Amino acid sequence: MRLRSPFPAALLLYATSLPAQPAPTPTPPAVAATPAPTPVPMIDLRFIRFKISAGDLPSAESILETHRAEKGEDEEYLLGLAWVARGAALLGDWPDASRYAKQAREAAAKRLGSPPVFENNSEAAYALGTAIEVEAQALVAAGKKAEALALLDRESKAQENAPYNLRARIQKRRNQVALVGTKAPEIRPEDHAGAATPPALESLRGKPVVLFLWWESCGDCKAQAAALRQTVQKYADRPVVFVAPTRYYGKPEERAEEKAKIEKAWKDVYGLPDSVAVPISDEAMRRYGVSATPTFVFIDRKGVVTDYLPYRMTAERLSQEIEALLK
């Protein structure tokens, strides 16, 4: 019986007319590839912060423990340890806060060496500052304010050659413990921006004073600009004086350029080119503990600090503080 091809005759004719193709080159046997090593996960400080903000300290501790087991006590571990100490303090867990602060201090001291080398050791400097702050907070929480102040004064002297931010953090914490109710430290400018000459605080007795301590490149400061401008305008006809201290952050040879940036920011971002004096003083910024900007200080008619707030504020809260000064 003759079988019929399933292909049309024309297709078969075309196929048989094609030139012969060379035999395919044999494929060499596959060699089993060496599997790539599984990357060890790095700690993500955001996860620790998220857990702390949710009040979940145990999970933050677990993230830190896992990182230590897999990567050891590296720079990220040191930062995480500092954040767990701070988180415990924020949650009012003072035994754990003190324990982690002690661990952070020891790890930071080991990394910094003796005498301490701060260059290229920013993580250790941050951890050390956090440890000192948390230790002081724990003492205050235990009703040992005098001991907390003694600790901060001792550390201030011990870290007199440390980077600016570490020294300012220690002073900031001391201010939060003891500045309210005391005479406002004087501001002695090295320079000033704008046309307004910075007044001495002593010369402002009889008027409430609001200090806005800032940095021209600070994002939070820029975000504060609208509320600050609104508040300054609101009290323009009232006996309230606003002063905006800042400092030079760059190299000495760059100061002319940096001053121009300060003046431009004060005019363009804040819209307060002449109505508020802008003293430039490294000493004043350090004495007021400005490790983070912005910082607000409220001073009554007698020159006494009534509030010290190292963070952003709404226009409403600013007004509440000022109204209290005007009573």
Image (cartoon, helix red, strand yellow):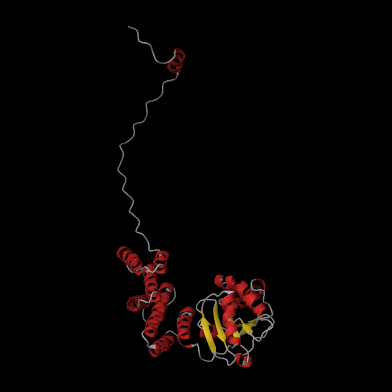
Displayed quadrant of residue 112: bottom left
Residue in the image at 57% along x and 91% along y: 303
Q: Closer to the camera, 39 or 25? A: 39
Q: Closer to the camera, 280 or 220? A: 220
Q: Closer to the camera, 192 or 251? A: 192
* 307 to 254, vertically: above or below: below
- In the rendered image, the residue lying farthest to the top is 1
* 28 to 2, vertically: above or below: below
Asked if one can make out residue 256 in the rendered structure from this viewpoint, the answer is: no
Query: On the rendered image, what quadrant is the N terminus found in?
Result: top left
Residue 315 locus on image (x, y percent): 59, 75
Residue in the image at 37% along x and 62% along y: 42
Asked if one can make out residue 85 in the rendered structure from this viewpoint, the answer is: yes
Number of numbered tags placed on the structure image:
0
Residue 48 locus on image (x, y percent): 39, 66
User: Is residue 292 left or right of 233 when viewed as pictured?
Assistant: left
Residue in the image at 58% along x and 78% along y: 318
- In the rendered image, the residue lying farthest to the front is 327
Residue in the image at 41% along x and 23% along y: 21
* 146 to 275, vertically: above or below: below
Query: On the rendered image, what quadrant is the C terminus found in?
Result: bottom right
User: Is residue 238 left or right of 130 when viewed as pictured?
Assistant: right
Residue 105 locus on image (x, y percent): 36, 78
* 4 to 226, vertically: above or below: above
Displayed quadrant of residue 281: bottom right
